[in-house]
Image: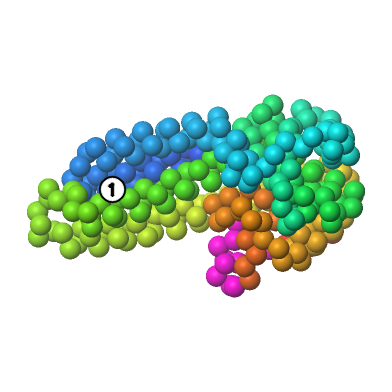
Amino acid sequence: MTLYTQVETNKRKTFFYIFLFLVFIIFLGWIFSWIYDSQIILYIAVVISISQALSSYYIGDRIALAISHAVPAKREEYTELHRLVENLALTAGLPKPDVYIIPDDAPNAFATGRDPKHASVAVTRGLLNILEKKELEGVISHELAHIGNRDSLLMVVVVVLVGVISILSDFFLRMRFWGLGDSRDRSSSVPILIIALAISILAPIAAVLIQLAISRKREFMADASGALLTRYPQGLADALKKLSSDKRQIKYANDSTSLLYISNPMKRKSWISNLFSTHPPAEERIALLEKM
């Protein structure tokens, strides 16, 4: 299988993953509707899953930019950045995405948008300060690859749906402690509570594991696609070296939005945090790029 056929397969899988998350949320609602003997819970889960999927599809990019405190990059102030994005987008056969600046000294970047016609690229102020032109081209080409591969749509949808699963799990668990859903035989309260507790803990973990499986594979794909775009893999490799060695953490990034960024903004070094990282190890990405 060539890189190009992998990209086509990647696009088809995007909507499958979205469907999988929707089913997962509805299944979670069905389980808790049975546990608490309340059909209304299932209806609420269906409404929430569909409404959140639609909102993440249509305005998820605006939400991601707002959470990151990104502001439009004025062309007169960031002329070179606009020109670079424009030239690479033209080479990639994509419309020029909107360009945003994140007022943060930690170097990083991300792309968002439901399709190439509604896409944005956001870079931190720190990224522009430490990267040379070839390295910045590598980063921008990586983000354009996410847009071209439709990763930017999937990643922002995943951010929203993982958050919804976590919130629902926490809410359903609290229902038991609030004394709601007690219409079942009280003799079954203890086992029901144990089941509710187990699902409330395992559901967010399962959602995160799905998130990790999706985001890690797509980072490798975007690295390869970006390197093909610039014909200079070493530029992106050198950029990743600088980003991974920088110890500053983006102020407004969190565990939910970390998968959007080219480099994990959560600068933790424990083996547990690395296990649940949304990004593959920088060393692996750099080694693959240097072999190209």
Q: Which residues are magenta?
A: 270-281
Q: Is residue 16 magenta?
A: no
Can residue 17 be seen here? no
Q: Is residue 59 left or right of residue 150?
A: left
In the rendered image, residue 278, in percent from the top left (x then y), is placed at 60, 56
Compared to 268, does 172 lie above or below? above
* Circle 1 SS class: helix
Q: Which one is in front, 77 or 95?
A: 77
Q: Is residue 89 left or right of residue 5?
A: right
Can residue 216 be seen here? yes
Compared to 243, does 82 lie above or below? above
Question: Which quarter of the figure has residue 251?
Answer: bottom right
In the rendered image, residue 254, in percent from the top left (x then y), is placed at 57, 55
Q: Which one is in front, 44 or 252?
A: 252
In the rendered image, residue 20, in percent from the top left (x then y), is placed at 46, 42
Q: Is residue 84 left or right of residue 264?
A: right
In the rendered image, residue 40, in percent from the top left (x then y), is placed at 24, 37
The residue to which callout 1 is attached is 31
Quadrant for the C terminus in the image: bottom right
User: For the point 37% across and 60% down, which residue is it?
Assistant: 201
Q: Amino acid at mark 1?
A: Ile
Q: Is residue 202 left or right of residue 117?
A: left
Label 1 neighbour load within 10 Å: few <14, some 14-19, many 20+: some
User: Which colour assignment does the render follow?
Assistant: rainbow
Compared to 86, does 202 lie above or below? below
Question: Which quarter of the figure has residue 152?
Answer: top right
Q: Which one is in front, 136 or 11?
A: 136
User: For the point 75% across and 64% down, which residue is it?
Assistant: 246
User: For the point 59% across and 45% down, which residue is it?
Assistant: 67
